Amino acid sequence: MAIDARSAMPGLMIWLFEYGRYAVQIFLVMAGYLASRSLTRLANAKLNGRKLLRLIINRYLRLLAPYIAALIFTMLCAWITRFWLNDEFVGEQETLSQFLAHLFFLQGILGLDSISAGVWYVAIDWQLYSVLAVLLISFSSYQALIWFISIIATASLLYFNRSNQYEAYFIYFIGSYSLGVLAYLAKNFSDKKIQGLAKFVLIAIGVIITVSTLQQVWLRNFLAWFVAIALLVWGNTAYPSASSVTHGLRVSVLRAIAWASPRSYCAFLIHFAFILLA
């Protein structure tokens, strides 16, 4: 299908192949921003080890139900597809160990083939959320937390994110995720000193990214930083309600967003199954 699509739309498909994955940077920065909003509230309420474990497990369970349903549906679609097509993107027959590895988000770490496209992101999102939760209770002050986050974010953006061998681990993605965390702290934290420090670190990382272009230009790092700055400026802006808007087109758009938003995770998980059937 990729070959046919490229022959039909060569310019578009080449552009998507080169730059389509950059959208992941947007997801990661926004995920860090939103995770910080919920986790800092819990941390301020004296989050201890037992509550932390419960929080991480609850996050896992929240992701798991639609995730399992999508995996089973995709395996069924792949089984049907193999009657007509034996192609690399369909993959080999799934094994029990492969399925169990997916249940615990270990398929990438164990080097197993992915059952469905996109499930790697679910595993990475859970890793990043868990790491952030652990960091929030590991430091006695937010000043120390911010300095530590700045170090691992810089290391990720300039080193780990440039080597494919780390793709199955949080360290590969935590640079972009941390920019979202810093944007939230810089905009919404109650202590003005913490806000100021987070803004300083966010700007400093931007300077480091710019200086690093003297060696090699990495556009995805700039994209992640610009998304973080956008969240710093507009992160608290609310959608207008459909009832408060009179323009017909805007009402339709807002209603479409409201309808699609709670369904987007399941659509993300299950889209590959329909590609198999097509």
Image: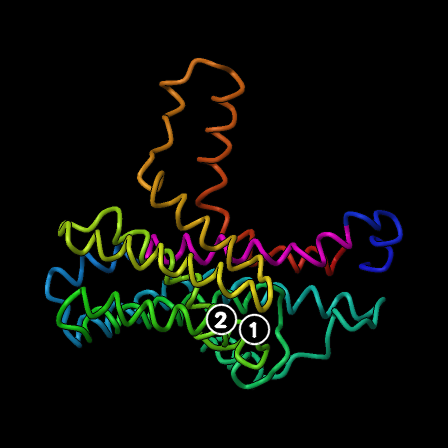
* Amino acid type at image mark 2: Leu
* Residue 164 against residue 142 in the figure, above or below: below
Q: What is the CA distance from the residue labelled 1 to the residue labelled 2?
A: 7 Å
Does 159 sit left or right of 133 as displayed? Answer: right
Above or below, 174 against 110 in this view is above
Residues 105 and 174: in front is: 174
Tell me residue 59's x, y (percent): 33, 65
Q: Label 1's element?
A: helix
x then y, percent, for residue 25: 51, 57
The answer to which quarter of the image holds residue 163 is bottom right
The stretch in magenta equals: 13-35
Lateral position of residue 186 relative to residue 11, left or right: left
Tell me if residue 94 is in the magenta stretch: no
- Identify the residue position indicated by label 2 in the image: 158
Q: What x and y, as percent, mark residue 23? A: 56, 53
The amino acid beneath tag 1 is Arg
Residue 140, by quadrant, is bottom left
Query: Can you identify the residue that label 1 sits on?
Result: 162
